[in-house]
Amino acid sequence: MNDTMVTVVGNVATNVEYRETATGGMARFRFAVPSRRWDRRGGNWTDGPTSFYTVFAWRSLAQNLAGSVSVGEPLLVHGRLKVREEEADGRRRTFVDIDALAVGHDLTRGTSAFRRVVKSRDPDERSAAAAGATPERAGAGVVRAAPQGAGAGEAVAQGAPLVATL
């Protein structure tokens, strides 16, 4: 298959919309990618027009996006470029989407803390995690650190989801 793969750097323009589907979770958000160019006369960088993309993510990436990303945050998005055309009211419109394979914060513009999530078998806990609930807010223990000195297997065996400290 000859998919067009892209990696774009920009900012989250809308809240992440998350929903469960028959094949797993799906998340969608709008992504603003400003163009910058060097102005030789002025000797500085200037902003050009901004391109907007709709980013789609599926399954675990969708769940993790819903709990990790907010409007205005700088991201890198890597995925398949999809261009679609629709006709409504006699007008043809073109939409550019990205089916995301990987998404991460742009660490040239800030810091981030990674938390590994162990998948829960309880659907209520998965829904709370996708909604961005922390263990304190959800009350379900969606994400808990392993006991001091315990290995990952011990924490899971005790029924406690695990956050790996890296």
Image (tube, grey):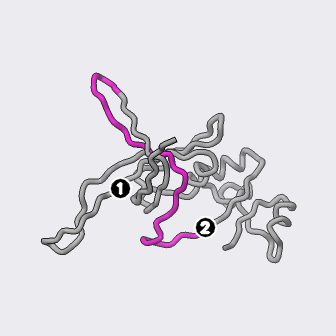
Camera-side residue: 56 or 63?
56
Q: Mark 2, mark 1: which one is toward the viewer?
A: 1
Q: Residue furthest front?
A: 1
Magenta segment: does it hold 118? no
To which residue does mark 2 refer?
114
Q: Position of residue 51 (x, y in %)?
A: 32, 50
Residue located 67% across and 63% down the image:
116
Q: Which residues are magenta?
A: 87-113
Distance from the alpha carbon under mark 2 to that under mark 1: 24 Å
Question: Does residue 13 appear to the left or right of 111 in the view shown?
Answer: left
Establish if 84 lies above or below 47.
above
Task: Report the magenta stretch's main SS.
Answer: strand
Mark 2 and mark 1 residues within 8 Å of each other at the beta carbon: no
Specify the label residue 129 is tagged with.
none
Q: Amino acid at mark 2?
A: Phe
Establish if 143 lies above or below 17.
below
Q: Secondary structure at mark 1?
A: strand
Establish if 123 lies above or below 135.
above
Question: Does residue 106 appear to the left or right of 65 in the view shown?
Answer: left
Residue located 42% across and 48% down the image:
30
Mark before the other along the chain sequence, 2 or 1: 1
Q: Amino acid at mark 1?
A: Val
Q: Residue furthest top?
A: 90
Dot 1: few (<14), some (14–19), or many (≥20) neighbours within 10 Å? many
Magenta segment: does it hold 98? yes
To which residue does mark 1 refer?
33
